[in-house]
């Protein structure tokens, strides 16, 4: 990371909002409903959803033979 760079800045969303969105995903709440209940812009919720889908392989354990 360079000086002044933050994870939140790179993600484009605060950890507080990210936690709210991820909790919604865990609870199987629709993206529009997450946005409605949290007041977080739907575009941000959908961006987090896309990133969540794009990185699913990083959250899965190695397959056992």
Image (cartoon, grey):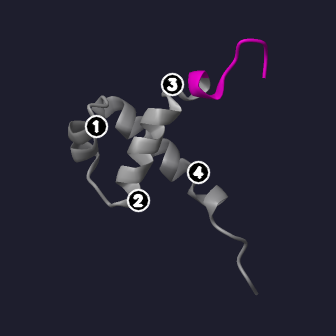
**Residue 7 placement, left or right of 16:** right
Nearest to viewer (mark 1 / mark 4): 1
Kindly indicate whether the residue at mark 3 contacts the one at mark 2 (C-beta within 8 angstroms): no
Q: Which residue position is annotated with label 1?
A: 38
Magenta highlight range: 1-9
**Residue 36 placement, left or right of 9:** left
User: In the rendered image of this protein, does residue 37 appear above or below residue 5?
Assistant: below
Q: Secondary structure at mark 4?
A: loop
User: Where, by quadrant of the figure, is residue 17 drawn?
Assistant: top left
Q: Residues under labels 1 and 2: Cα distance?
A: 15 Å
Q: Residues under labels 3 and 1: Cα distance?
A: 17 Å
Q: Which residue position is annotated with label 2?
A: 26
Kindly indicate whether the residue at mark 1 contacts the one at mark 3 (C-beta within 8 angstroms): no
x 28%, y 55%: residue? 29
x 68%, y 70%: residue? 61
The spot of residue 13 in percent (x, y) is 48, 28
The spot of residue 57 in percent (x, y) is 62, 59
User: In the rendered image of this protein, does residue 36 appear above or below residue 55?
Assistant: above
Does the magenta-highlighted stretch encompass residue 2? yes
Q: Residues within 10 Å of mark 1 (few under 14, many from 20)?
A: some
**Residue 63 placement, left or right of 45:** right
Q: Which residue position is annotated with label 4?
A: 55
Residue 53 — which label? none
Q: Which residue position is annotated with label 3?
A: 12
């Amino acid at each position: 990371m360079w000086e002044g760079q933050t994870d939140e800045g790179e993600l484009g969303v605060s950890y507080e909002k990210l936690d709210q969105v991820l909790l919604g995903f865990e609870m199987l709440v629709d993206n529009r409903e997450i946005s409605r209940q949290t007041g977080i812009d739907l575009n941000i919720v959908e961006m987090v959803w896309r990133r969540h889908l794009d990185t699913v392989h990083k959250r899965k354990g190695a397959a056992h033979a």
